[in-house]
Image (tube, rainbow, N blue to C red):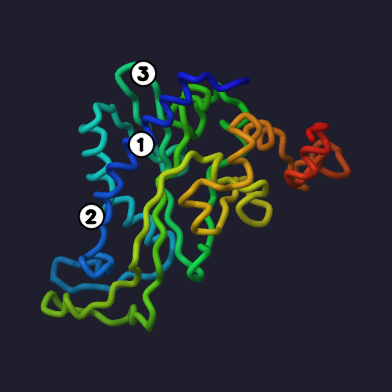
Amino acid sequence: MVISKEKLELKEKFKKELLIHVDLFNTAISTNSGDWVVKGFIDIAKNIYTISVDTKVVSKIMELLLFPKICHFAQEYGYKMFLCKEQNFYPDVSFIDADNNIYAVDLKSTYRKNEKEVNGMTLGAFTGYFRDRKSTKNISYAYEKYTGHFVLGVIYSRTDGDVDEKKVYQLSDLQNITSVICDFKFFVQEKYRIALDRPGSGNTKNIGSVIKIDDLVKGQGPFANLGEDMFDDYWMYYLTKDMAKSIDLKNAPYKNLKEYKEYKGIK
């Protein structure tokens, strides 16, 4: 299937609008010095408990901080906005324009391993709704209904030094509490442009992402120049070892882009 010029233009328009608004997101999550605005959890006795640097905890709090800004984006550009029904649904947010074009946006966060690389992300399943594109199981709208699939990503650094999670602070200590993360960088890319040709980790059935920061920001993954059609075809028929075994295949037909091209006879 060839993607129409109209669809390409719609996707580019949506991306540009979201990128313009992303510049405001830093103010929602960071101080002027680049530290995270979140210092901990507070109880009714006004005791403050420091936050774990656990990626799942950080990711969830990041979502809560960003949702008001995302709502403002939807209002400003005239999109209807729908959040996913359950935690394991795709995508995190669906936007619908006046002509009923639907855009999927998944919120992703990952930490820097060094100056050039991050820990990586997963970009959604390559089974289920990804293969049965009329299915509405674990997805807000059928996959085929979406005009574009985007990742709104935030890259951060873990704060140097120890954070004592056992220590309880008071409100008067607020300025002295160390933020567990800092130095944020946002990006917006179509999912296929930052996807790898292998799963996120181990035997998981989620698509992996590139890990170089420059590749994430500029959308320079291995499928970027091959197009979304090839990305879709590759992942719709990709088999893990267990998946191949379950249908009595000795080996999967391919396990990377090089083998895929050989299998398909693509030069």
Residue that badge 3 annotates: 100
Task: State how far apart marks 2 and 1 are (Cα).
Answer: 20 Å
Residue that badge 1 annotates: 16
Which residue sits furthest top? 99
Q: How many marks?
A: 3
Say which label, 3 or 2, has the lower sequence index.
Answer: 2
Q: Is residue 7 above or below residue 82?
A: above
Do the residues bearing badges 2 and 1 touch, measured as CB atoms within 8 Å?
A: no
Q: Amino acid at mark 2?
A: Ala
Which residue sits furthest right? 250
Task: State how far apart marks 3 and 2 are (Cα).
Answer: 29 Å
Graded by Cα atoms within 10 Å as few (under 14), some (14 to 19) or many (20 or more), the crowding at tag 2 reads: some
Q: Amino acid at mark 1?
A: Lys
Foreground: 168 or 203? Answer: 203
Residue 101, position as x, y percentages in the image: 39, 21
Say which quadrant the C terminus sits in.
top right
Residue 157, position as x, y percentages in the image: 40, 68
Foreground: 134 or 19? Answer: 19
Q: Nearer the viewer, mark 3 or mark 1?
A: 1
Residue that badge 2 annotates: 28
Do the residues bearing badges 3 and 1 touch, measured as CB atoms within 8 Å?
A: no
